[in-house]
Image (spheres, rainbow, N blue to C red):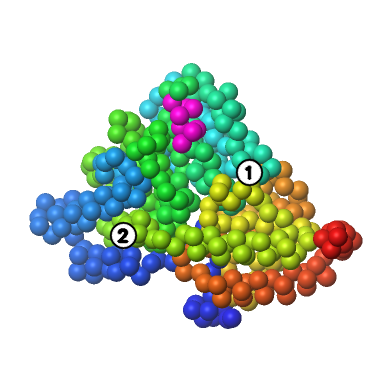
Amino acid sequence: MRTDNRDSLVYLDNNATTRVAPEVFEALRPYLEELYGNPSSAHTFGREMRGAVVRAREQVAACLGARSADEIVFTSCGTESDNWAIRGALEMRPEKRHVITTRVEHEAVRLLCERLERQGYEITWLEVNSEGELDLEALRAALRPDTSVVSMMLANNETGVLFPVEEAARTVRENSDALFHVDGVQAVGKIPIRLSDWQVDLFSLSGHKLHAPKGVGAIYIRKGTRLPSFLIGGGQEKGRRAGTEAVPYIAALGAACELAQKFDGHETIRRLRDRLEDTILETFPNARLNGTRDRAKRLPNTANISFSYLEGESILAHLDEAGICVSTGSACNAESHVSSAVLRAMNVPYTSAQGSIRFSLGRYNTEAEIDYALETLRSVIPRLVEMSPYDEELRSLAARGRN
């Protein structure tokens, strides 16, 4: 397979971004061509654009299981939604300066909380165990009268580990008056979500993770939750977020959410992921899974595997040369060349963390592509093992594997 031909790519990096679905592109196209009006304009043309925004809001609300479409506000991305949720909660109640989050959050939450900590806010960082799972008793113990907001992800972007946010939401509601924010960016379109049944106040999503274009997201704001505006200006989004709505991308996000609701191929994706994961772990003695082995507690598409004593960047480069796209962790932190904060929080040994590869599958992957990826790994990994300075450790692992 050759990387100069997009049709020949084996794309196993769907947690970084997804291909825009053809159905989504067709929903977007008219608003880049003849339907170019401003949805805030009072004339018929403007009202037509406004109707597209209304439809998309209903589609997103249905996908999230929200009670009302009015609980959906469009943003530019998941990062904006995360920042707005946390900063808005703190602005709403300035006397409350305590935030609770986890060590394994996406950079949009983790780096924001690190900045807030430098600015004098108190942050409680919840730990995870070696399998990336959260202890809800630690959450209960951390809640205080001055806790403003609790922010945690629904699905980890690197390991796919799911947090029990429904139970966490009940814990927050029963033991405090803090707002509960969920970063749902990696979960939407992959697992069922029913916000009307969950005691979640704020929920973030991003379009490009579920086959819409990059540059559009949304935030769910539970009815009755007062969240100060993040962007100040015109009265768009019922005065909640200023700025002319990006109608083409909003229409695309709505179409992507509707497409996600109709998709019935999750078990196929799970089966392909399981086969890829199982074969790698059985074939290579230095391979280890990062994240819980209980697959019911992970996204159906994600496998994070470390190849101990090898460099993830070298594995990625060899796979890339063969036309296979994977990642070594979060795409938003891909150029830092430091060990993943998520794997460090899980106490994954450095010699394994540096060799981690995230495989994230999607609706367009096929059995033949998994065959090719496995065939390529069977060629690449032994070659890198031969070049590794840790040859004694690798021989020891191989010997234990044979036994």
- Where does residue 342 sit, x and y in percent of width and height? 63, 46
Which kind of residue does numbered mark 2 sit on?
Answer: Ala
- Where does residue 93 sit, x and y in percent of width and height? 40, 24
Give the mark count: 2
Extent of the magenta region: 166-173
Decide whether the magenta segment is chiefly helix, strand or loop.
helix
How busy is the neighbourhood of tag 1: few (under 14 within 10 Å), some, or many (20 plus)?
many
Residue at the farthest right position: 392
Q: Is residue 382 left or right of residue 237?
A: right
Can the viewer see residue 195?
yes
* Nearest to the observer: residue 52 or residue 137: 137
The quadrant in which residue 304 appears is bottom right
Looking at the rendering, in which quadrant would you find the N terminus? bottom right
**Where residue 255 is drawn, which disc sits there?**
2
Q: Is residue 299 left or right of residue 70?
A: right
Q: The residue tagged with tag 2: helix, strand or loop?
A: helix
Can the viewer see residue 231?
no
Q: Does label 1 or label 2 sit earlier along the sequence? A: 1
Residue at 32%, 42% in the rendered image: 66
Residue to which mark 1 is pinned = 132
Q: The residue tagged with tag 1: helix, strand or loop?
A: loop
- Magenta stretch encompasses residue 167: yes
